Image: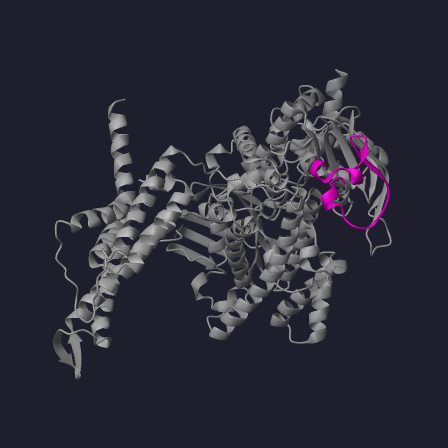
Amino acid sequence: MEICKIENLTFTYPDQKTPVLQSIDLSVHQGEFVVLFGESGSGKTTLLRMLKQELAPHGDLSGTIMYMGQNINDLDERTAASEIGFVMQNPETQIVTDKVWHELAFGLENIGVSSPVIRRRVGEIANYFGIHTWFREDTTDLSGGQKQLLNVASIMVMEPNMLILDEPTSQLDPIAASNFIDTLEKLNRDLGLTIIMVEHRLEEVLPLADKVVLLEAGQVINTDTPTNIGVRLKGLDKNHRMLRALPTPMRVFHGLDMEGKSPITAREGRRFLTDFMNGTKLSNEIESEMVQDEQPIMEVKNAWYRYERDLPDVLADVDLQIDKGEIVSILGGNGSGKTTLLNVMSGQNRVYRGKVYVHGKKIQQYKGKELYHHNIAVLPQDPQTVFLKNTVRKDYEEIAQVLYKDDSAIEQKIKDIAEQLSITHLLDNHPYDLSGGEQQKAALGKILLLEPKILLLDEPTKGIDAFSKETLQVLLKELQAKGMTIVVITHDVEFAAMISNRVGLFFDRTLISMDTPQAFFSENNYYTTVASRMSRHVMERAITDEDIIKICHNNQEKLYEKTVD
Amino acid sequence: MRSFSTYHPFILFIYYVFVLSITMFMMHPVILFLSLVGSLIFYMMLTSVRTLWKEIRFYLFVFILMAVTNPLFVHKGETILFFLNDNPVTYEAVVYGVFISMMLIAVVFWSKAYSYLMTSDKFVYLFGKTIPKLSLVISMALKFIPSFKQQIKKVHNTQKTLGIYTSESITDRIISGIRTFNSMISWSLENAIEQGDAMKAKGYGLKGRTNFSIFTWNHRDMFVFIIIVIVFIIIMFVNGLGGYSFTYYPVLSNWRITGNDIVKYILVMLLVFLPSLIELKENLQWKYAKSRI
């Protein structure tokens, strides 16, 4: 049975000429897991919000949305509130109350359920989600992953039929995100819950999805099963932008111009490569360049750090040399102290033993602004914190005034940076109105106005979609080509493999290995990229999908001979 | 060691009302002394001997300061001890100073213990019964404040690395503070909008909202409730008959404790030592139960 049916939906925001959604047709069956996918600005969020009466935006609407055979606008308020659940992007802002148990009960209180029933339902749900161990905690003490889990639980307690999620894992680290998606799978499998979600972690979501809906510029360009979606995209355009956002095994599959059902998981990818290679063993001769210099641009020597005298060390005997013009990625789990290392490198925290040198000079010898003008710049995890003004331009102007005195020079500089980042059209927007990826680019722009020589990035891929990630990657490479030295602190293994000259792993308060990405990822068995995991049995040192495709192309003859034999 | 905190919030609430009212409004020296001892012992049980000792060292200083101040400024009383700058220092004023500071310190320690027991959710529960909207607002505020603080810290740290208004000078600090605060306004509004959406999505605003709490009233609560109410009523009754009256000025009332008085003071002891006794009892009970395993 169709739980939700959208027919010929067109929607235009009040102050705009072009519609955000154009003649959308979509039907979702009971118990289906549907993934919506598209670039930011393609109308995904608007479409999701249209499905939830309380959140539907105002504007010009034509077409119908039916829920269980009834127009969604005619639904009784109580039914609408409890049967359709909605989870938003930011785990923090959705939580209403200060205690976990109260948050779980909040929805039931609203629809007027009596206390004994609430007690039972809350107890049941807390057990199902494994929340019982932190049932009485304050909501502010929870980790991001726990918060998002609580958000889902506090909706599930109302026993919805349909759960709508808008990029729920974008603010979570990979492990928390993976746990969260597992929970969704369990809900879908155990309860037959209908799930409609917008998600960019396709690698984990696609294997679960029954249906993928591709949105582009407010239109559904395709709807199909995950295994066929790549072929459909290729049919539209051989180099479709969305192809590059697909999971690694799918990208390899399409990069090699294969036909048929594509592999989705690393396991399927591995099987596919075994068949494809047909017994040949190849290896990757490409190695990232190591930049070697006499004098490192930045050096951390035997650094020890702790936040307070009575607390344990966060950094213990850390040694790190950064050479001019390289991109170094430092990987590590949550709370391993990566961000602390970054703060030590940027002079926000001072080591209590050991030394930090910048351009061969001790960091504490830099006075006040010296360290941050024409020198070190930091892009924080939350790009929102960079902005203080009403428009991006005002923020830019203020910071540009520090380095340039002349008004026309300021204007020119802002123009240049905006063009380089292709954000000229965003300059007069309020920073908070930008999407995650745009916000990050704008924040990076503000920091680049200080003309840094060393750029430190803290989790730059958090909260941005696959497309913005690719843009960021290109951008960082461009900056590197201009001579900038870049240090990236990240969870994102794939991103590190793509951009770095060297990769290090931060574990147990110190850096435990530092190597070229090829050496680093091909030696690791668990802490490595999907491409490396699916190809290691037939190829040496291939760590990205591009590596695999390139190796296959370069050795076409060899592979061809094999198949002829 | 927190068994008293497991009682129903209402018990905690009326207990504190009773104990604070006899401490604050009945100026009898024996009551004040008992109340002080009761508060110290209970506070020690909630924390540790070390914490209590640390606190006492500070409050001893406060105690002496207050006890000395009273006779220096108040010259009532008949028994003059000596003259200071032509002003009489009286025996009664000294005694009053000692007991008034005893009262203040007892109130301080009761309140400290109270803050350990009366967590925000209990507080919200108590007042939510009468004003449901208010209790939700308090609960939301309690959630908002920590995240607001966190955000201020984040913005501040980021702005520091941008290198404007970051010197140690006072003007820079003030300007930097104002800038951060400005951005916090937009942040709060943004936050409020999203939170409003989340609340609407969960059906906030529908008619017939109920109030749920995880606190339940059981026979243990009933038992303690009856005891404290009866004891308090008797104390009030005795007080009404003048049983606990005591005057400091112009002459101190009679101090001597006679056999008849013992019962009066046992009642007060029962009230002020009740939480400590409960802690002690449940502790022993636990040890006993464990020894039988």
The tally of labels here is: 0
User: Where B175 falls versus A21 (above or below)?
Assistant: below
Say which residue appears at 47% left-offset and 68% top-offset. A367
Q: Is residue A218 left or right of residue B108?
A: right
Say which quadrant the C terminus of chain A sits in: top right
Q: Is residue A308 magenta?
A: no
State the residue lying farthest toward the bottom. B86
Residue beneath the point at 40% across and 51% down: A303
- Tell me residue A95's x, y (percent): 58, 45
Tell me, yes or no, if residue A515 can be seen here: no
Q: Is residue A380 above or below residue B218?
A: below
The magenta stretch is A51-79
Image-based side of B88 in relation to A560, left or right: left
The picture quadrant where one finds residue B82 is bottom left
Q: Nearer the viewer, residue B196 or A448?
A: B196
Question: Along the horizontal axis of the image, is A43 left or right of A187?
Answer: right
**Residue at the image position 33 percent from the left and 54 percent from the top:** B20
Front residue of this view, candidates A508 and A195: A195
